Structure formats: C-alpha cells, structure tokens
Image (cartoon, helix red, strand yellow):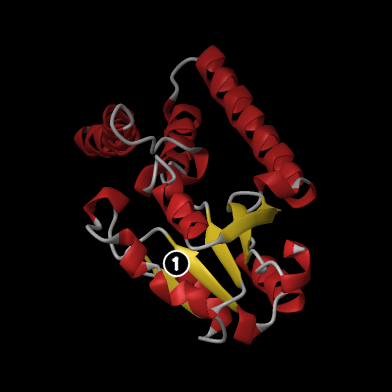
Amino acid sequence: TQTTKKKLQLVLIWLIVPLLISWLISFIVPVIRPKRLLLLLPGFYLLISWLISYSWQKKLRWLAGLLFSLILLINFYSNYQYYNQPQYQRENWRALHQEIQQKFAVEQTILVFSFPTPFAPWRWYDQGQFATLSTGVLNIKNNADLRQTLKPVNEYQYVLVFDYLRDLTDPQDQLLTALEAYGYHGIGVLDYPQIGFVRIYRRQPLLSYANWH
C-alpha cells in the first residue's frame, strides 16, 4: 500500500542518510565509530521486521528471519564482550579520579587540559577539589603566550597532563615542552582505556649545596 511504501522510505532514509553523512565527514574528522552509529540499529531492526511481515515469498521470509537471528547473536556476543573486556567499556573517569585522589595530594597537584576548559567528566567527579588549568583554545597554536598561560603550575610540585584529545589540540607537544622549560620532568603515566594517558610531571628538585662539592 501507499502508506507502507512511505514508511519503508522513511526507514531507508533513517539508515542511509546518517551513515552517508558520517562517512563523508570521516574524511575530515574520524567520527565513524560503533557507539556513534547506534541510532541506525532500530531502523535496521524495523527493516528486517518489514521483510519478515511483508515478504511475499517464503524464501525471503526465512532469509529475513535468519538475518534477524544473526543480528541478535551479534548483540548478545557484543554485550558479553562489553561487560568482560574493559577496553570496550566507556571512559572510566570515576576510577581515574579515585586513583588521582589516592596518589596525589590536592595542595601539591594541578591538572592541565589542552582544551578551552577542563573536561566535563572530570569536573563532574572532582567538584573543584583539585586545581585545574586549561590552555583556553581548541588549537594550542592559537595561544600566543603559552608559557604565560602555564605559569600558575609553578606553585605545584606535580602537574598531571591529559592526553585526551591532545593529538588534535597540541599535535606538536608544545604544552609538554613548555612544562619542561619550567623545570618539570615526566616521571610516569596513568593509562586508562578510552581516556588514554595522564602524564605525570614533577618539578626537578634543586641540587643541594653539598652536590656542588
């Protein structure tokens, strides 16, 4: 019927248009990832349901049922993998915040973000406990005086730098170079799936008088 055709067209648009737009944009920004295309899954199920309900040939109906069963099996397996493999899970900002709380004193530590503002998940879990500093720009090249921006870190012994998104905002590692110019040296990392490295910098202690003799 005409109504059925319109509904089918709507489902096809639902499936094709977002996927096509995402594919085109991915040539500029890598946006195609499974979690960003989950909105297509209900449309795909509707299309399979339509094949099962309106197939005029028994063979097509069996094919649609087989396809539906296969998708369900993939979903069950994916859910199993998600709950048992940390690398497939969402960004665990809560655990990262807890580890930083346990390992670093609030009064000695500042967190640095190569972003206009501190990341929203960090602000949510931290609630302003730790001092933070952001570069204030999406591209660090647009910060005319980066060393001046980072000057407040001199009040702290530890500086934690988030690598999250920094490949895009600071591809030449200018932020790390500026920290090293202030006398900080990398001593390790905190590595969290989906978040990446949080680089640990510590101010190099000044040589004592005895070391000069």
User: In the figure, 22 relative to 124: above or below?
Assistant: above
Quadrant of residue 27 within the rendered picture: top left
Quadrant of residue 77 within the rendered picture: top right
Q: Is the residue marked by circle 1 packed among few (<14), some (14-19), or many (20+) residues within 10 Å?
A: some
Q: Which of 60/97 is in front?
A: 97
**Location of mark 1 (residue):** 119
User: In the figure, 107 relative to 9: above or below?
Assistant: below
Q: Which of 118/15 is in front?
A: 118
Q: Which of 141/197 is in front?
A: 141
User: In the figure, 129 relative to 120: above or below?
Assistant: below
- What residue is shown at x 55% (from left), y 13% (from top)? 59
- What residue is shown at x 59% (from left), y 31% (from top)? 68
Report the residue that reaches farthest toward the front. 213
Three-letter code, disc 1: Phe
- What residue is shown at x 43% (from left), y 41% (from top)? 37
In the rendered structure, the answer to whether residue 184 lies left or right of residue 48 reads right
